[in-house]
Image (cartoon, helix red, strand yellow):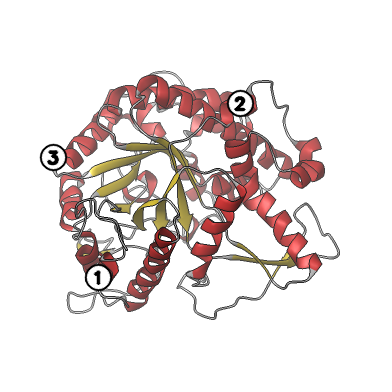
């Protein structure tokens, strides 16, 4: 563990420290004020999905505890709050009437942040597709991209004058592969053709969303949040290195190449192109509009080896052994160098704008004992990964900020409430919030910023 002051000295004074959450994971109030169902509401209530039939009906009850939670963020000493806006609160059916009560909630959220001197980093889509759109095909339908554009326009027209930054999407990889190919997230499909349609229409929606942001609020920096994976081959054999390249194209390139190069990766298209939807003339131009920033969500590396039998579909890889036996309670390998690896690799491959670490954190399920939560492993995780961010800055990479995932324990998607990522512990029976040891450490670090615009040596 590094002392907060020692670590702070390694960052420029204008570096942004923040905390992050997502609407469905914390808000609850699933039927309040005109909100209609998300695909996740339906998914949670289907037998065999998620953990113990946990759902987002109450979550952290943030919708009803907004002021208290904004005070909590202020008390964390951070300069910025990254949150997501729930589409089904704004346009409950996905298309059709706008719900003023939903916009009012986010008005209060943004104004509450402003009143407390907290910068607002909004995400327009963190997986909460209005359920009615799923009936039209959801992300596998081109029409959803245009519905998203209208939703983005509606939000930016209302909030754009007060937002400090906005992202179109959070983690396309999850929206596409985890939800439509692996069936782990809503809507739970396992179909490569469906996933490829979702991939292109979500990429298109991103581009249309950027157009909407720039039309309604041209001064707000527009970005995209990607959970890019550091793809590490299991050996230096030619076969494993080639497998690593295929894995990069599938896991990262399917989203980075269209946005930052205006094309899909070559081997990827060769293998899967016949199952992709028709790409219309202007699509790639719309998708590849220049961004002001990009966000990286990093937790764990992807280690791959060649699959000589070429089972199933591209990318024909097998899992390679882990380099570290340290893992979090969700089972993910702890490997801080993976963060350095992925940033270096992506800046080598693409012309990327400035970067924010939009999520980074660890799942450890310690409970409250005598009013305290001793989550030393999480604290060590933060300390090690932030040291890597400081190294990247020293090496000249344009790292501008860091958002800890997450402000508080919350609904962890398919894992329900059993997995805890928070800097703040939530007792789901009483809704009592308790700042953990890691949260107190992070508060000490974040409180050092902003510290004037000196540059770290």
Q: Nearer the viewer, residue 66 or 295?
A: 295
Query: Can residue 148 be seen in this snapshot?
Result: no
Mark 3: few, some, or many residues within 10 Å (few <14, many ≥20)?
Answer: few
Q: Are marks 2 and 3 in contact (CB under 8 Å)?
A: no
Mark 2: few, some, or many residues within 10 Å (few <14, many ≥20)?
Answer: some
Q: Is residue 199 above or below residue 396?
A: above
Q: Residue furthest right?
A: 309
Residue 313, image x, y percentages: 78, 52
Residue 274, image x, y percentages: 81, 36
The reply, left or right, for residue 213 in relation to residue 63 is right
Q: Are marks 3 and 1 in contact (CB under 8 Å)?
A: no
> What label does residue 285 carry, if any?
2
Give the spatial CA distance, label 2 vs label 1.
44 Å
Residue 118, image x, y percentages: 20, 45
**Mark 3 sits on what residue?**
115
Residue at 13% from the left image edge and 39% from the top image edge:
115
The reply, left or right, for residue 32 in relation to residue 301 is left
Q: Is residue 166 above or below residue 238?
A: above
The reply, left or right, for residue 119 in relation to residue 186 is left
Residue at 18% from the left image edge and 55% from the top image edge:
72
Quadrant where the C terminus sits is bottom left
| SS for dot 1 | helix
Give the quarter of the image for residue 272. top right
Give the spatial CA distance, label 2 vs label 3.
39 Å
Q: Is residue 451 above or below residue 374?
A: above
Q: Earlier in the sequence, mark 2 or mark 3?
A: 3
Q: Earlier in the sequence, mark 2 or mark 1?
A: 1
Q: Nearer the viewer, residue 251 or 450?
A: 450
Residue 417, image x, y percentages: 39, 61
**Mark 1 sits on what residue?**
4
Tell how many labels: 3
Instruction: Give the label, 3 or 1, closer to the camera.
Output: 1
């Amino acid at each position: 563990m590094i002392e907060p002051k020692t670590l702070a000295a390694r960052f420029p004074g204008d570096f942004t420290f923040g905390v992050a959450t997502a609407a469905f994971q914390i808000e609850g109030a699933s039927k309040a004020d005109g909100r209609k169902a998300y695909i996740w509401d339906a998914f949670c209530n289907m037998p065999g999905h998620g953990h113990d039939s946990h759902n987002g009906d109450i979550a952290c009850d943030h919708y009803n505890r907004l002021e208290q939670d904004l005070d909590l963020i202020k008390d964390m000493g951070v300069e910025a709050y990254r949150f997501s806006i729930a589409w089904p609160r704004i346009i409950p059916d996905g298309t059709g009437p706008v719900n003023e009560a939903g916009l009012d909630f986010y008005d209060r959220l943004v104004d509450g942040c402003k009143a407390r001197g907290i910068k607002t980093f909004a995400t327009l889509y963190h997986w909460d597709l209005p359920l009615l759109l799923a009936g039209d095909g959801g992300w596998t339908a081109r029409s959803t991209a245009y519905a998203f554009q209208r939703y983005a326009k509606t939000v930016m027209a209302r909030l754009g004058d007060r937002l400090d930054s906005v992202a179109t999407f959070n983690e396309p990889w999850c929206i596409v592969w985890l939800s439509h190919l692996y069936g782990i997230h809503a809507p739970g499909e396992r179909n490569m053709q469906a996933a490829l349609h979702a991939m292109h229409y979500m990429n298109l929606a991103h581009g249309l969303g950027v157009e909407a942001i720039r039309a309604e609020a041209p001064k707000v920096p527009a970005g995209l949040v990607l959970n890019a994976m550091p793809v590490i081959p299991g050996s230096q054999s030619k076969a494993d290195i080639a497998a690593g390249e295929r894995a990069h194209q599938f896991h990262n390139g399917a989203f980075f190449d269209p946005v930052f190069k205006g094309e899909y990766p070559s081997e990827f298209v060769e293998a899967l192109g016949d199952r992709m939807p028709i790409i219309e003339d202007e699509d790639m131009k719309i998708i590849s509009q220049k961004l002001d920033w990009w966000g990286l969500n990093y937790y764990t590396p992807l280690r791959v080896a060649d699959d000589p039998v070429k089972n199933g579909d591209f990318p024909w890889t097998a899992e390679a052994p882990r380099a570290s036996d340290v893992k979090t309670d969700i089972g993910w390998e702890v490997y801080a160098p993976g963060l350095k690896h992925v940033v270096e690799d992506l800046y080598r491959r693409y012309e990327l704008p400035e970067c924010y670490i939009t999520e980074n954190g660890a799942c450890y399920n310690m409970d409250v004992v005598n009013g305290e939560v001793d989550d030393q492993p999480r604290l060590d995780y933060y300390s090690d990964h932030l040291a890597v961010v400081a190294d990247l800055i020293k090496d000249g990479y344009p790292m501008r900020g860091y958002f800890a995932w997450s402000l508080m324990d919350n609904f962890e998607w398919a894992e329900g409430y059993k997995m805890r990522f928070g800097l703040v512990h939530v007792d789901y029976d009483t809704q009592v919030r308790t700042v953990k040891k890691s949260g107190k450490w992070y508060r000490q670090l974040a409180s050092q910023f902003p510290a004037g615009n000196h540059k770290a040596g």
